[in-house]
Image: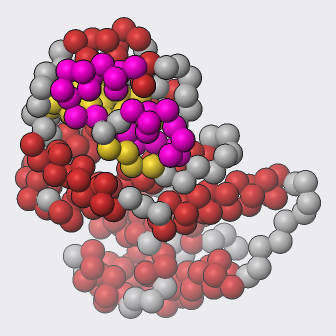
Amino acid sequence: MSSYVQRIREATRQQFSPSFERLADYFLDSYAHAALLTATEIGHSLDIDTATVVRFAQHLGYGGYPELQREIRAKLRRELLDELKTQPNSAAEAVDAALSELAHGLDRTRKSFPHQQAKTLIKDLDVAQRVIVIAEGLAFGPARNLAAWLESAGYNIHLAGGSLSEIARALTGARKGDMLIVIQIDEETPFLSSAIAEAKTAGIRTIALVSSHSSSAAHYADLTLAAHNTLELGADQFIVEALIYAFMRMLYRARPGRFKNTATRLQRIRHFLSREDRQ
């Protein structure tokens, strides 16, 4: 018999009502909560009628919500209690080792998170006229995410890639009162360190978000936020992403007013796009 996850994925989602869509996403992504909640409580949290929750379970082939919940609880119990066993030198062992390395790096980054430096960065953002974000190689993905989050909070952002010409153009337009944030993971070129040195001569505040304290950008920047280096190829990209995510959560808590307007605009645009789609 197929699991509820398979049943949801095999269902014709295009024919789902908006309420069924929300329930499908909820049971796929938030099943740990669903395991503890009644149909009435789920309906209340999603602003959906309790009867709709029951009908959704029946649509998947269950007699009712309790039957679906029993399967969800069994899935959660297996994940929490069953001991993971992998064969030596197998693909499963490689996956487990990779995720264990990330978990270790994340835990070390959590314990060593530079709270005071992050608080200073928030204050610096308050007075920055423009924020220039530059990165290269593996760091460009995290840099793009940071730029998008800061821009959504109302900061004036300029994102530049790691090529010499892009960095040069970004610095050419920089003025006193701007801020330069450098994201560095793998040190492919000396461009980022040189960019920091050039910005400092122009009186621009420089920030380095790096994968380790030994990164060259950390030696030159006015302020450094460093993650815990895992020494594993490719893993540091995810650790730096986590560092940035944690900082953004801190910024959200410290400056909630900046994000309220964003939520309102996002809701308005979503409503507009969905209305256009129906025409």
Residue 75 vertical placement versus 165 (above, below): below
**In this picture, residue 175 sits left or right of residue 12:** left
Image: 117 above or below 158: below
Q: Is residue 69 found left or right of 222 in the rendered image?
A: right
Residue 71 in sight here: no
Residue 166 counted in the magenta span: no
Q: Residue at x 73, y 82 (%)?
A: 82
Quadrant where the image shows the C terminus: top left
**Is residue 200 depicted above or below 251 in this figure?**
above
Foreground pick, 120 / 211: 120
**Farthest-out residue, right:** 88
Q: Nearer the viewer, residue 221 or 187?
A: 221
Q: Which residue is located at x 53 percent, y 46 percent?
A: 212
Q: Is residue 223 above or below residue 130?
A: below
Is 11 placed left or right of 40 in the picture? Answer: right
Q: Position of residue 88 (x, y in %)?
A: 91, 60
In the image, which residues are magenta? Answer: 194-220
Q: Quadrant of the N terminus?
A: bottom right
Q: Position of residue 244 (x, y in %)?
A: 38, 50
Question: Residue drawn at (37%, 54%), measured in percent from left and top?
Answer: 245
| Residue drawn at (55%, 63%) of the image | 108
Locate residue 269: give its quadrant.
Answer: top left
Front residue of this view, candidates 174 and 98? 174
Query: Based on the displayed image, in which of its 4 quarters is residue 151 positioned?
Result: top left
Q: Please tell me whether residue 211 belongs to the stretch shown in magenta.
A: yes
